[in-house]
Amino acid sequence: MIVADVADQLPTVPYKLATVDDLEETVRLVEAHDRRAVAVKADVRSQEQLDAAVAAGLAEFGKIDILIANAGIWTLGSFWELTDAQWDEMIGVNLTGVWKAAKAVAPHMIGRRSGSIVITASVNALEAGQYTAHYVAAKHGLIGLMRNIALELAPYGIRCNAICPGAVKTPMTNHQGAWDMFAGHPGGTEEDMTEAGHHYTLLAGTSWLDPQDIANAALYLNSGLASKVTGATLPVDAGHLTLSGYNPVITR
């Protein structure tokens, strides 16, 4: 396994991003299961760095069977107040970075006529989201990108699918700015976020999802159980997209 992350703070992101220590911890967790892992510091916006990560994977393991394009950021702001830097960084990481990651592995997979690519999209790839026009635009773009990758790589026996997670509790969503948004006022708490999560899902007793829920979906899509699944969009959202929705604006 090759684990790649920028392992640095990006200028427009207000919450703490993963570090080199987090990369090394991931390697330790993999090795605890008697498997091999190599950590590579790479920015998904750099084709050169991604190509180097792929080269490191080939040198270590001899082949690449799977790409999980999971890098992403989430920031907030009304669309008319977003800066160019906020827009460009969001699109660069969440959309362009996935394209470049797929580009990095495609020649090798084409040569082997085998492979699976799984893209982490979002329920916001299928619906709008308050204060997240740049995020929504990037995630909607991922569905089109996924379908085209599936179309163009199918003749080589390579599959491509997208997971659309609902609200997942990670450092990306569990911070003061997010708490305030979910509370509807400054000074929000994690308890406010948890309560809001119960209104976001359909399944009883479910608030924010665990990252393992999304990992399980990736495991399925990359397994033989999904050998005939390609070009698919798989929501993992505890039924969120089935809800009639919630209007954040009070109407009278």
Image (tube, rainbow, N blue to C red):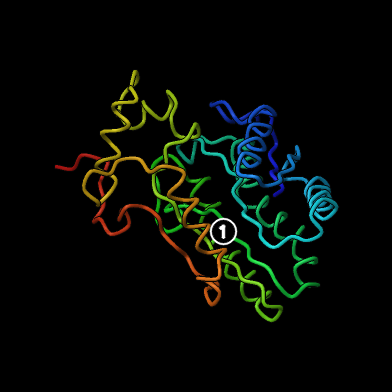
**Residue farthest toward the left in the current orientation of the protein:** 252
The 10 Å Cα crowd at callout 1, few under 14, some 14 to 19, many 20 or more, is many
Q: Nearer the viewer, residue 191 or 23?
A: 23
Percent across and percent down for residue 8 are 69, 29
The C terminus appears in which quarter of the rendering? top left
| Residue 24 appears left or right of 104 | left
226 vs 20: above or below: below
Residue drawn where x is 80% and y is 65% of the image? 108
Residue drawn where x is 75% and y is 37% of the image? 41
The quadrant holding residue 98 is bottom right
| Residue 152 appears left or right of 168 | right
The quadrant holding residue 66 is bottom right
SS at badge 1: helix
**Residue farthest toward the bottom in the current orientation of the protein:** 155
Q: Which residue is mark 1?
A: 142
Q: Nearer the viewer, residue 169 or 80?
A: 169
**Residue farthest toward the front in the current orientation of the protein:** 34
7 vs 59: above or below: above
Percent across and percent down for residue 159 are 61, 71
Q: Amino acid at mark 1?
A: Leu
Percent across and percent down for residue 189 are 33, 22
Q: Nearer the viewer, residue 234 or 212?
A: 212
Percent across and percent down for residue 111 are 81, 72
